[in-house]
């Protein structure tokens, strides 16, 4: 089993939105490395830290799991979508997505709290210049985050 941190803007899809549905399609990823994680590495059942980004207080807002294998992101073909890619075709899709199933909402584990935890200093999301919407999380980092969430 692998672990991931996946960023979502709460205005687009929040942990509450995800909990209200059987699963959510993780659409709109337009970074090749993040796409490759979904397409080549992520597996059904992998653990996900559901992270709210681009908001007043960013941080981990819930726990989820990967619920499907990767498949083409339909927004790349929709000329009216902000995620439209004129270079993509149905025969050769450029962008993939997968489904994520929210398991539970947690207290907000704020970015500032993550930064103050010495055991997490190597966590990808905390590295300077890290802007990827999907990053791997080590088993040790996952365990530390779980203990922080249970501590309160």
Image (cartoon, grey):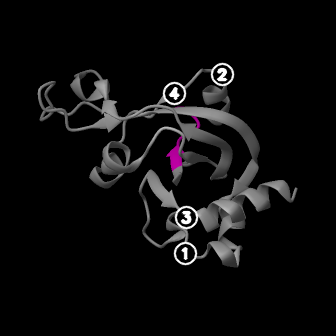
Find residue 45 and report its horizontal and vertical position in percent: 54, 40
Of the two numbered discs 2 and 3 in the rendering, the one whose residue sits closer to the viewer: 3
Q: The C terminus lies in which quarter of the figure?
A: bottom right
**Is there a contact, CB below 8 Å, between mark 3 and mark 4?**
no
Q: In this view, does 79 lie above or below 61?
A: above
Q: Earlier in the sequence, mark 3 or mark 4?
A: 4
In this figure, which residue is indicated by the disc labeled 3?
138
Residue underneath mark 2? 20
Question: Residue at label 1?
Answer: 122
User: Which label is found at residue 24?
Assistant: 4
Q: Taking 150 as reference, is 130 above or below it?
A: below
The Cα–Cα distance between marks 1 and 2, rounded to whole angstroms, is 33 Å
Whether residue 13 is situated above or below residue 58 in the rendered picture = above
- Label 4: element kind: strand
* Residues packed near mark 3 inside 10 Å, few (<14), some (14 to 19) or many (20 plus): some
Q: In the image, which residues are magenta? A: 6-13
């Amino acid at each position: 089993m692998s672990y991931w941190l996946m960023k979502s803007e709460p205005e687009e899809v929040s942990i509450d939105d995800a909990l209200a549905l059987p699963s959510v399609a993780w659409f709109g990823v337009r970074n090749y490395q993040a796409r490759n994680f979904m397409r080549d590495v992520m597996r059904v059942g992998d653990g996900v830290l559901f992270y709210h980004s681009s908001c007043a207080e960013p941080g981990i807002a819930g726990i989820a799991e990967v619920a499907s294998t990767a498949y083409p992101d339909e927004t790349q073909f929709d000329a009216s979508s902000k995620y439209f890619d004129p270079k993509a075709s149905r025969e050769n899709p450029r962008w993939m997505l997968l489904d994520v199933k929210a398991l539970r909402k947690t207290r907000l584990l704020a970015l500032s709290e993550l930064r103050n935890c010495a055991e997490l200093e190597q966590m990808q999301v905390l590295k300077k210049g890290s802007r990827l919407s999907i990053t791997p999380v080590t088993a040790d980092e996952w365990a530390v985050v779980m203990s922080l969430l249970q501590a309160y």
